[in-house]
Amino acid sequence: MKILTLNINSIRAHAESFIDILRGGEYDTILVQELKVDDANFPHNLFEEYGYNIRVFGQKSWNGVAVFSKFSIEDVTRGMPNFPDPNARFIECVVDGHVRIINVYMPNGDTVDSPKFPYKLDWMRAFTEYIKQYAASPEQVIIGGDFNVALTDMDVWKPANYVGIAIAAPAAREIMQEWLNAGWTDVWRAMHPNDVGYTWYGYRGRDTVGNNQGLRLDYFLANASAMGAIKFCEIDKNPRMAQKPTDHCGLMLKMD
């Protein structure tokens, strides 16, 4: 199975470039974040012909997550069960009867002195508790999405620019590190231990992609059962280079 995770930054605004991905058929399962549309207005009609089953947890104008798969999608949970949240940031399902996938769009948090920052940390702490049940599970479990955390300074093109910014805040990094300490693997980093690789490039500034002025905010985490089946994990810059691009690259993995 080949899986892609992609923050689309409005699936209606970037429908054409997203359809190019579906039409290409390279990916068996696609995790999408930041839909910016509610369930009732999700444009199923644009995507139905490309052979994907679709499960959506949307929200008007903000947030929203979805799973597209050529395989069956079952046991769907919308919203983190242990964290009441008005925002659509979490969808969990079982794909092809045996791979459990959790697709997340974690809070940004703005700056460390913003009222949004405690919400970010509370969300991440609840997530810490929720995923404990899967870390040592014999079931293959993959967590993917936009985590809105640059885990280390190696994941930030210019760390001095992000002092006081929530995505690089020590408190957020520490929570994410707890997940790795508990047995989850940061798949891309495990396979590229010494590489610089960014998944987000802002629209502002002159050629941020060409100048490699980005952040690594998008991740796959795998439990031990899943990690044993993963063959590779790479950053796909094509979505960021589209004619009308999202501000994120894709991140892809291949597993048996």
Image: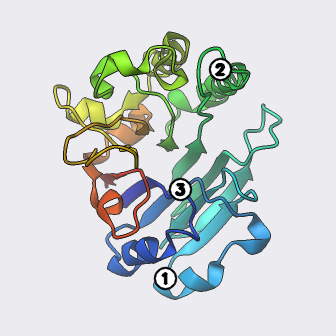
Residue 153 visible to an observer of this rendering: yes
Circle 2 sits in a helix, a strand or a loop, which is it?
A: helix
Would you call the spot at circle 3 few (<14 residues within 10 Å), some (14-19), or many (20 or more)? many
Q: Which mark is residue 9?
A: 3
Nearer mark to the viewer, of 1 and 2: 2
- State the residue position of label 1: 51
Residue 152 visible to an observer of this rendering: no
Please give the name of the residue rendered at 59% of the width and 43% of the height, measured from the top-left corner: 105
Circle 3 sits in a helix, a strand or a loop, which is it?
A: loop
In the image, residue 11 above or below residue 142 = below
Nearer mark to the viewer, of 1 and 3: 3
Would you call the spot at circle 1 few (<14 residues within 10 Å), some (14-19), or many (20 or more)? some
Please give the name of the residue rendered at 33% of the width and 67% of the height, measured from the top-left corner: 242
- State the residue position of label 2: 121
Give the CA separation, mark 1 to mark 3.
Answer: 23 Å
The scheme the figure's colours follow is: rainbow
Say what amino acid the circle numbered 1 marks: Gly
Circle 1 sits in a helix, a strand or a loop, which is it?
A: loop
Decide which of 206, 114 is in the foreground and name it: 206
Q: Reading the chain from its start, which is encountered first: label 3 or label 2?
A: 3
Q: Position of residue 5 (x, y in %)?
A: 44, 53
Say what amino acid the circle numbered 3 marks: Asn
Q: Reading the chain from its start, which is encountered first: label 1 or label 3?
A: 3
Please give the name of the residue rendered at 66% of the width and 59% of the height, measured from the top-left corner: 36
Q: Quadrant of the C terminus?
A: bottom left
Q: Which mark is residue 15?
A: none
